[in-house]
Image (spheres, rainbow, N blue to C red):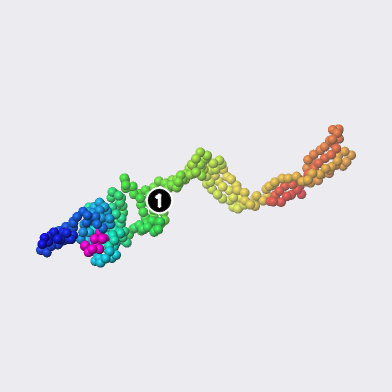
Amino acid sequence: PDKPLFVQNIGLGNVLFKGDGRFLAGTFVSDAIDRTSIGARAATGCQFMRAHQAPDAPDLVSFWQIITLSEVVSPTTVVDVLAVSGNNVLFGHGTGAGITSWRHVAMLEGGAFTGGISAPNMRGDTLVTVGDGTGGMAKGDVDGAGFNGNNLNIKSWNGIGFQNSEDLAIRAYISTRLGVIAAAENLQAGNAIFNKNGDVYGDIWGTGSGPGWLSAYIAGRPLRQYITMVGVYQNDKTKPFMLHDDGSGVFLATTDMLSGYVQSIRFGAVEHGNLYRSPGFADQLGYVITGVENGDSNDTPDRIQRRLLQLKVNGQWYTVGT
């Protein structure tokens, strides 16, 4: 009988022949077989196969060499396979009805790894880069960065410096040990600036035309000179003073001193008296004349008005002269 033709007809044309000297001569049977479900073929006991445009292949473009890892008994049995194409090695999981999930296992050196990586831990010996390789994380000593929820926790024994790539100078620094944020020039928050000379810039220090500097705000305030001395006159604590840099002295009013000042003045109720053929008003402390009437405009006034004059001192009203 034609044994090679028989083997090919039953789909085993490229498996090992006794004495052939090869483990696997090839897995290609036909284009139609390549397009058959990997899981379905594994369910028939096929352990080595090629897949191209199979419905459950990792993609519908590449040619994949498939190795079945588990003994498949029926279409409902779990199927685990390894798929190799070029530089990619993937692990597939499913049943005889088809492979339902694929995961990258490894990538041969030199190939581009385009899939995602999921692992409990990942370690690079010296460098982990992203993009074109010019940025990433380099090997350190005891420092590290970790994500905790939405927070990025950066562990540093002493501090973190931000180095300029052009001149390698560090102009911004965070000390994790001392709790200090330092900058060579200034610190900014929105439009506000805290400058290295101690001056402050912001909206609150503006003079009517936008933000301004604190130094200009102070210099432009009227009657504001720098204070050079504060003390008490002749060791009397009721007479404190401040001395400005222009040599002028300003005494402060204490609570005791304020209690002796007049806080307000008012008149009492009006009192009326007659002058014509009447004694009028005699002299009396606290009263002031507020009006004199002459109804018929002759040589003799007719009526007169007076009121008490009162002063408010330390919260109390007093009549003048009493």
Residue closest to the far top? 298
The kind of secondary structure element at disc 1 is strand
* Viewer-proximal residue among 101 and 172: 101
The image position of residue 133, as x and y in percent, is 28, 50
The picture quadrant where one finds residue 297 is top right
| Residue at x 85%, y 37% (from the top left corner) | 302
The picture quadrant where one finds residue 307 is top right
The image position of residue 62, as x and y in percent, is 24, 52
Disc 1 marks which residue?
182
Q: Is residue 308 magenta?
A: no
Classify 269 as above or below 63. above
| Residue at x 12%, y 61% (from the top left corner) | 3
| Residue at x 45%, y 46% (from the top left corner) | 190
The image position of residue 300, as x and y in percent, is 86, 35
* Viewer-proximal residue among 59 and 224: 59
23 displayed left or right of 176: left
Q: Is residue 41 magenta?
A: yes
Q: Amino acid at mark 1?
A: Ala
Any part of residue 20 in sight: no
266 displayed left or right of 113: right
Any part of residue 148 in sight: yes
| Residue at x 40%, y 56% (from the top left corner) | 150
The picture quadrant where one finds residue 43 is bottom left
Q: What is the span of residues highlighted in magenta in the rendered image?
A: 38-47
Q: Quadrant of the N terminus?
A: bottom left
* Dominant secondary-structure state across the stretch colored magenta: helix
Residue closest to the far front? 1
